[in-house]
Image: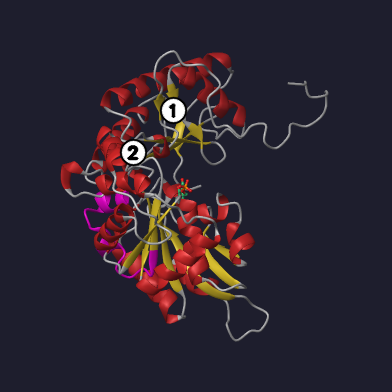
Amino acid sequence: MAARPAGRPAPPWAGWRYTMPVPMTERPVDLRSDTVTQPTPEMRRAMAEAELGDDVWGDDPTVIALEERAAELTGKEGALFVASGTMGNLVSLMAHVPRGGEILTHQGAHSDQHETANHAVVVGASMRLVAWDPDGRMELDAVREAFRDPSDVHQPITSIIVQENTHSDSMAQPLPASYVGELAAIAHERGAKLHIDGARLFNAVVALGTTASELLADADSASFCLSKGLACPVGSVVVGSRDFIWRARRARKLLGGGMRQVGVLAAPGLVALRDGPGGMIQRLAEDHANARRLGEAIAELPGIELDPRRISTNFVLFRIHGRAGERADDRRLTRLFLERLATNGVWMIEYTRDVIRAVTHYGVDVADIDRTIAATRAALDDVREMTPVAVAVADGGAT
Ligand SMILES: Cc1ncc(COP(=O)(O)O)c(C=O)c1O
């Protein structure tokens, strides 16, 4: 490959791979995300043996079974299998929001930060952002006030509230049905809808000791990911009324997301959504226990400010500090720490600016957590030796 001429900036795609710089000789403990999970042996068998049809014609029996199971679990009339969480959110917006409508959501929401402005490009809608508190909730009065005045010809029409559950940036707090109900009431009083971005919906269900149908009772629609903590290789499911699902199905087709013998991808979802130990929902409690184990241990390291009581599901967010007590604005320190950690066999990521994220999942067991604790201690020691500053780990909750 030709060398880049000196002084020429790197092209935007030059750093797109979120891989770690250090070659690994043994299997790393990969805590970058729960998206890295591999399908179980049973899922692989289910994929090989899946009964198939053509899902665009609506006759793939495995997809039909998955959609029926998802609707049953969430207490909704219908469901739609889609390629990703991003597509699930997008087809939901396309089904609910007219061109020139406005989407009301929380600052840092996945739909705002990580979905390439698809709401603007495809839906033709604007987005209005509301602050959230350490529990991951938007203040209800602030939500009411963020609604536009429909009688003012200058303003867009607020058409939908979108709320993540779990709410990622607050260290993946699970939001209870009572709060979902309050958001729904605000939306419905004003003729708007409530969509739940439940990429990690079942983490919330397990953490709260509730059911998906209780949690979504007041929501108009939701999407949840099969390909995160539930360990499927591909896919998300959108749920809602029969009429909404029909519009979402048309939206999926418009996006080129109508797939044919896609039962091969739906089959692991049927394994994941089983009740009890045969499925992948109940075991999410292990991921939550592992996150707490990790958080409680690193909170013991010198200079630590992390409050492990904030770890409610499978995210651990923390910061590296500068000189004692000072928050480092030097991202170099964070990067250095992540590099040293990778050398010690553990992968985490810089999540939002200066906040480091570790996510527990099906591919990580208690021994991996203990290896991570030791590697974190060693990386902190290394960074301290390599830089003149003290290092501390802090609660990365409210960002
Ligand atoms: C809260 C949230 N919503 C939506 C998505 C999108 O999922 P996907 O990566 O499958 O498009 C993610 C992915 O990490 C997420 O964390």
Q: Residues within 10 Å of mark 2 (few under 14, many from 20)?
A: many
Q: Is residue 7 magenta?
A: no
Instruction: Identify which residue is drawn at 59% across, 57% down.
Output: 118
Q: Magenta region: which residues?
A: 202-221
Where does the image place residue 59, in percent across and percent down from the top left?
Answer: 34, 59
- Between 388 and 168, the one nearer to me in the picture: 168
Q: Is residue 220 magenta?
A: yes
- Mark 2: amino acid: Pro
Residue ID for mark 2: 308
Residue ID for mark 1: 303
- Mark 1: amino acid: Gly
Placement of the N terminus among the 4 image quadrants:
top right
- Relative horizontal placement of residue 323, taking residue 263 as reference (left or right): right
Secondary structure beneath label 1: loop
Q: Quadrant of residue 133?
A: bottom left
- In the displayed structure, would residue 210 be above or below residue 341? below
Where does the image place residue 135, in percent across and percent down from the top left?
Answer: 39, 54
